[in-house]
Amino acid sequence: MDNDTHLRIARPSDDLDALLPFYRDGLGLNLLLRFEGHEGFDGIVLGREGCPYHFEFTHAKGHRAGRAPTLDNLLVLYMPDEERWRQAIEKMGRAGFPPVPSFNPYWDRQGRTFEDPDGYRVVLQRGSWTS
């Protein structure tokens, strides 16, 4: 892979309308696309215009996706600016999503963990990505 590669994380859900406020109103992502009846699937795609990542959630009619298999299924977003990190935490709270204790205590040291309606967790990590 190279720098022109884009990332889309896709997973199923039983309730797209329940997920939308978490990712749009809480995390501040934009609804880029909504589709219905696409070869038996409905879906939403969220992200930011021009950014190399998207989150896609789909629902297959007649199939149950279920909840996250463990409390340690994480999407970690690294936020180096402390003020923006604090604002993001506050925005999640205003949207009705309080932090939850992380399964792995490491994430509570410099981050806050939030659980989406499907039981998958997002960590807003105060810090820079190091490779």
Image (cartoon, rainbow, N blue to C red):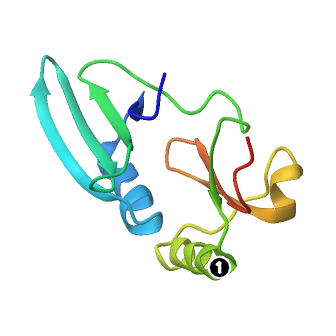
Up-down: is 23 above or below 4? below
Left or right of 70: which side holds 65?
Answer: left
Reading the image, the residue beneath label 1 is 86
Residue nearest the viewer, comparing 4 with 52: 4
Location of residue 104 by image quarter: top right
Badge 1 density bin: few <14, some 14–19, many ≥20, Cα 10 Å = some
Q: Nearer the viewer, residue 50 or 23?
A: 50
Amino acid at dot 1: Arg
Q: Position of residue 103 (x, y in %)?
A: 81, 45
Residue 12 percent coordinates (x, y):
40, 28
From the viewer's perspective, tell me whether residue 67 is left or right of residue 78. left
52 in relation to 38, above or below: below
Res. 62 image quadrant = top left
Screen quadrant of the C terminus: top right
Q: Residue at x 53, y 50 (%)?
A: 116
Residue at (59, 32) in percent of width and height? 68
Looking at the image, which residue is at 42% across and 56% down? Answer: 23
Image vertical order of residue 88 relative to residue 72, above or below: below
